[in-house]
Image (cartoon, rainbow, N blue to C red):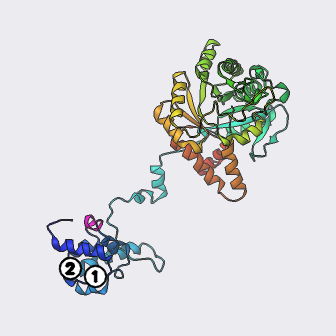
């Protein structure tokens, strides 16, 4: 406030000190420009509790009668003029009885102007979700029937022939053109070194061939890790002291990736989190002539509790230890600590240097900051895996009537995209695609 105006200073300090209640001096009110009290001079109002008098209180009720009685004619006129404005604003519609009548707040910036109509909101929307962003994960098994997964209502282990092709066909019809395949390996084919992972006639390899034969344009992604084939349930080979051995595991991961490429995979996706596997797989693919096959790397994959339903689906949880063989009950020596952010940037940087084509973050919604971090650091496409536990949470709440499933799911997926992921792996792929088509007026 201007120091050269002692009258105003004394008035405003009185207002501030008295909280607008005990206003006794008629001199102060008669000489003070009414605008400084009534909202036309924001720089003064914001410096005093007087602002609450001028704008947040119903007109005429906040100020003691002494004020109006002692105000000058000009001041009263100005006040009336402003009252008129307020009424005009209220005329656009009825307000409920009891709505306070106030002067416009002295704010020039009102972000709500751009949200007034549907057309405006569509114009200014910064993020658009489409079915082309989705990769549909599928679980396949040897049987002919589809077997529902209890912790993932709506999702089944699909027969590698009929069920798989039906599901992919439905996805394609809805605009989802990418799938990632996870095999449920029969127990008798699991070993402690997981050689089944590179069997050319293995479940994953047959599933890839089936999909590529029936739908050559569908982009097929695979999972590269030993856990579905490992009798001890880990993504790598477990040594007797419980250490998951890195370089030996990579030797088999390379064979697995090449056998998936031979079967027709477009992208192989290492989810194992061994050090140096992206570079080794790149070299192995190139040496086998698959320079065109891409690598979607699970770069920042966290040791998360949200994978529970997936492990039920594949029966792939770490196994119990025996007397002479330690088996860690979790994957914390290779998957990342959920507490860490900078470590994710380092992992992503290494994968990029080693030749990854897509960088993935997993899980999705609890890790939006990681998605954004990778997006800001790299120019590669970023993927996010909206994992089984995230699906299970939304489904459970929806089935109980606790959430509007459609709105909540589309918001979750949109948030993942807004954070920076253009590729979203989600068990909701088909359903979300259907909802998006309905929103766009397509049946
Ligand atoms: C295995 C793998 C897992 C997932 C994808 N690949 C499980 C794990 O790491 O234990 C989880 C996917 C999901 O929860 O939906 N390497």
306 versus 292 height, above or below: below
Q: Secondary structure at mark 1?
A: loop
Q: Is residue 372 visible?
A: yes
Quadrant of the rendered structure where residue 244 is?
A: top right
Residue 414 image point, x, y percent? 56, 46
170 versus 202 height, above or below: below
Left or right: 283 as drawn, with respect to 77? right
Does any atom of ligand 1 lie closer than 8 Å to the CB of label 2? Answer: no
Q: Nearer the viewer, residue 21 or 114?
A: 21
The answer to whether the residues at label 2 and label 1 have Cβ atoms under 8 Å apart is yes
Q: Magenta includes 6?
A: no
Q: Residue at x 40, y 75 (%)?
A: 91
Disc 1 target residue: 23
Q: Nearer the viewer, residue 5 or 392?
A: 5
CA gap, disc 2 and disc 1: 9 Å
The local crowd at label 2, few if under 14, some if 14 to 19, many if 20 or more residues have their Cα within 10 Å, is: many
Quadrant of the rendered structure where residue 387 is?
A: top right
Disc 2 target residue: 28
Name the residue at the left extreme: 4
Query: Which image quarter holds the N terminus?
Result: bottom left
Q: Residue at x 40, y 74 (%)?
A: 90
Name the residue at the front extreme: 323
Quadrant of the rendered structure where residue 183 is?
A: top right
Q: Secondary structure at mark 2?
A: helix
Q: Residue at x 72, y 39 (%)?
A: 310
Q: Nearer the viewer, residue 13 or 190?
A: 13
Q: Which residues are magenta?
A: 41-47
384 versus 102 height, above or below: above
């Amino acid at each position: 406030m201007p120091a050269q105006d002692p009258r105003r200073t004394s008035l405003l300090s009185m207002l501030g000190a008295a909280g607008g209640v005990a206003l006794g001096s008629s001199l102060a009110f008669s000489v003070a420009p009414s605008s400084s009290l009534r909202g036309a001079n924001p720089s003064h109002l914001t410096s005093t509790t007087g602002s609450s008098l001028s704008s947040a209180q119903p007109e005429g009720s906040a100020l003691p009668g002494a004020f109006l009685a002692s105000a000058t004619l000009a001041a009263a006129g100005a006040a009336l003029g402003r009252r008129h404005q307020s009424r005009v604003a209220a005329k656009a519609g009825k307000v409920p009885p009891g709505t306070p009548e106030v002067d416009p707040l002295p704010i020039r910036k009102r972000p709500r102007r751009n949200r007034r109509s549907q057309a405006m909101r569509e114009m200014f929307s910064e993020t658009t979700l489409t079915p082309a962003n989705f990769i549909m994960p599928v679980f396949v098994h040897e049987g002919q029937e589809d077997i529902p997964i209890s912790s993932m209502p709506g999702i089944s282990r699909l027969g590698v022939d009929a069920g798989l092709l039906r599901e992919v066909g439905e996805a394609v019809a809805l605009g989802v053109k990418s799938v990632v395949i996870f095999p449920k390996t029969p127990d008798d084919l699991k070993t402690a070194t997981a050689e089944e992972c590179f069997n050319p006639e293995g479940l994953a390899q047959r599933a890839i061939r089936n999909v590529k034969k029936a739908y050559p344009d569908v982009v097929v992604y695979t999972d590269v890790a030993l856990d579905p084939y490992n009798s001890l349930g880990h993504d790598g080979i477990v040594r007797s002291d419980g250490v998951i051995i890195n370089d030996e595991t990579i030797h088999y991961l390379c064979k697995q990736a090449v056998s998936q490429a031979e079967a027709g995979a477009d992208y192989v996706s290492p989810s194992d989190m061994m050090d140096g596997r992206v570079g080794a797989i790149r070299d192995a693919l190139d040496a086998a002539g698959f320079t065109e096959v891409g690598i979607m790397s699970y770069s920042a994959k966290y040791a998360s509790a949200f994978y529970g339903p997936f492990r039920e689906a594949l029966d792939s949880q770490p196994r119990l230890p025996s007397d002479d063989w330690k088996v860690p009950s979790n994957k914390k020596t290779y998957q990342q600590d959920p507490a860490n952010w900078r470590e994710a940037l380092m992992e992503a940087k290494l994968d990029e240097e080693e030749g990854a084509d897509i960088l993935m973050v997993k899980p999705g919604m609890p890790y939006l900051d990681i998605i954004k971090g990778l997006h800001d650091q790299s120019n590669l496409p970023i993927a996010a895996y909206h994992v089984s536990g995230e699906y299970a949470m939304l489904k459970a709440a929806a089935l109980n009537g606790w959430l509007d499933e459609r709105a909540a799911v589309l918001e979750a997926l949109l948030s993942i995209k807004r954070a920076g992921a253009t590729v979203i792996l989600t068990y909701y792929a088909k359903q979300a695609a259907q909802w998006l088509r309905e929103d766009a007026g397509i049946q």
